Image (cartoon, rainbow, N blue to C red):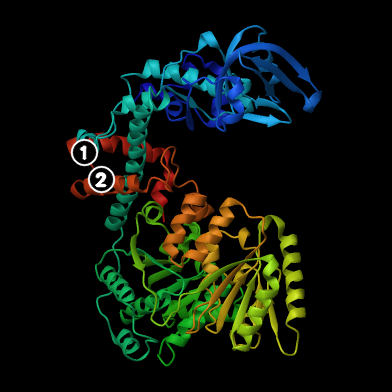
Amino acid sequence: MEFLKTTIEYLKGVGPQRAETLNKEVRIFTFNDLLHYFPFRYVDRSIVHDIVDVPAIDTDVQLKGKITSVKEYGAARKKRLVAVLKDETFSIELIWFKGIKWVKPTLVVGKSYLVFGKANQFGSKWNIAHPDIDLVDAVKLIPGMLQPIYHSGEKLTSKGLNTRGFERIVSNLLTVSKGKISESLTPQLISEFKLTDRDTAFQDIHRPINSSALKNALFRLKFEELFFLQLAINKQKINTQRKSKGYVFSKVGVFFNQFYKTHLPFELTGAQKRVVKEIRKDLGSGLHMNRLLQGDVGSGKTLVAVLNILIAIDNDFQSCLMAPTEILATQHFHTVKELLNGMDINVKLLTGSSKKKERSVIHDELINGSISLLIGTHAVLEDVVKFKNLGLAIIDEQHRFGVAQRSKLWKKNTFPPHILVMTATPIPRTLAMTFYGDLDVSLIDEMPPGRKEIKTIHRFDTNRLKVFQFIEDEIKKGRQVYIVYPLIEESKTLDYKDLMDGYDSISRRFPLPEYRVSIVHGKMKSADKELEMQKFAKGETQIMVATTVIEVGVNVPNASVMIVESAEKFGLSQLHQLRGRVGRGAEQSFCVLMTSYKLSVDARARMETMVRTNDGFEIAEVDLRMRGPGDIMGTQQSGIIDLKLADLAKDNQLIILARDAAQKILKNDPDLTSTENLIIRKELIRQMKLKPNWSRIS
């Protein structure tokens, strides 16, 4: 491994100047960094086409011919370099708009070249912009051999580090590193999963002799990457459990039993009962609970949370329930107060809007222990908020809270409180295993009885009059309607205009005194928003025109229609969350997705998915394939998982294999101290030093 720590400037073909560019542009400092700078695609360069066949080929094409002319056209920024390549069948233009001063000296009229790139038609002519180009004599064409393509950029290209430049320096590295790349996995793992050895894998990923060698190299290196990630996450879980003793909630007492017998709004579903048992087991184990509770919108997570809060109260501990927005915190407060009505339990709400006098009372009552449950927003995390004995912290929609914010809850006590994280955003299994690998996962995969599936319909803007008629019919049945407009950060003014234009046309179509319309958007004061929400919740207004502030929050059983305007601007999980705002009562509910006719392929796929299924987990899987893991998990999580080869959206089988292998090893040897596992321990320590974030997951 010492060899791989060598500074990159000492590699043949690099030197100080190129090394500086590699440091700045792509963070390559050592031989090891370059070894891990993987090609992003490969092309079969053994096939050469005739120029006359170019119009029939819609992929990258390789041509062989002589350069017959080289000319520059235009001036300054509009300058372009045009060379004509001719073979026995026809000719084609090669065009460069950038890097002209480096390309021009390499083009010699009369010499034969191999040219590779995507051909485009301009008028009646065909051309290839910025092709890869080599002298025929410099390239050895071997049937089936794949050429790696590396990411580059203008500054790298100016130093001769285009994809071919990278290919050359990587080739130099592979020549001197052969036999010097030490193994990181045990012989048992290599044998069990039929893995290529590490040295061969690096040779074959950069210089594959055929597609089979490349496939084996990719499998080996992806497995290694995911294995060490899962090992780090699961090792962290073991360390946390060892270090963090948990409060023991030994009894289920008066409050829990009273609530269960007399206050339950409906019989618990089988899934809710299972989850309550899982959490009860954690709370009584003496170990610190760190659990993720997943359940679709309306699946009854809040009820499960309340049952566990009652267990904490029965054991003389306080609880807190944190939500990401004031609207949602207030919603939770009203829901919980209603559920606990008639029970002698002091529940308080703390948000950014809480008055100074209210805060003072809350602070005193938390310290003397008379508040059993505090519900609030980020305000709960302020240093001034101190508990007498916080035993359980519940975090709703946790992906909206940063890592540092959540860790503040741990410091509210000598012992950290038990943590229950809740989310209504269904997370695909592979993401949950990776981003929340150090949490135990509970799943509510059953809806309460009596809920009818929401019917989802996609309509184009031209059908607006029919949609308005449908709204009128539903209001005449005594129902209420949400009409939601998108809010996109970059164009708040435009969105505000769309919202107000929409509000005006809806007010004209549904005039006073027969109809009353509420409006809620981000520019309003909190008190005004709250007033409009309450009017709608009480049934004083029949239509709520809003931006996505209602994505989480309002629970209005009588609202049975959700109209989403410009639905193509929303992501799948957001559309699914919005749809979950209706369907809360016994009546049939509807979600109408309004779009223009001009839809991208992705937008059309999102609409089709929403119409086809109500299953949050199926939607999450489609979302993962379309958007990738980073967007789904939110910006706070970015940088924690830095995968170079594996893809959390596509390599789900491999993630499960790697996770199972890591857990099996840690079960038998949690500290990786046995002789056979020392090789793994050494590599894990090396990687942990490079990725400090790993130790802070969740």
Q: Are marks 2 and 1 in contact (CB under 8 Å)?
A: yes
For label 2, the residue is 661
Closer to the observer: label 2 or label 1? 1
* Helix, strand or loop for disc 2: helix
Q: Is residue 307 above or below residue 684?
A: below
Can residue 143 be seen here? Answer: yes
Given residues 618 and 381, the one toward you in this image is 618
Given residues 399 and 348, the one toward you in this image is 399
Three-letter code, disc 1? Glu
**Residue found 32% across the figure and 55% down from its top:** 240
Question: Total of numbered circles in the picture?
Answer: 2
Which quarter of the image is occupied by the N terminus?
A: top left
Q: Give the x, y percent position of residue 221.
A: 35, 34
**Residue found 46% across the figure and 13% down from its top:** 140
Spatial separation of the CA atoms under disc 2 and disc 1 = 10 Å
Label placed on residue 276: none
Q: Give the x, y percent position of residue 235.
A: 30, 49
* Image position of 316 (left or right of 340): left
Q: Quadrant of residue 116?
A: top right
Given residues 220 and 641, the one toward you in this image is 220
**Residue found 24% across the figure and 38% down from its top:** 193
Residue at the top extreme?
Answer: 110
Label placed on residue 192: 1
Can residue 386 be seen here? Answer: no
Q: Quadrant of residue 306?
A: bottom left
Q: Give the x, y percent position of residue 659.
A: 30, 48
Given residues 411 and 15, the one toward you in this image is 15
Pointer 2 or 1: first along the chain:
1
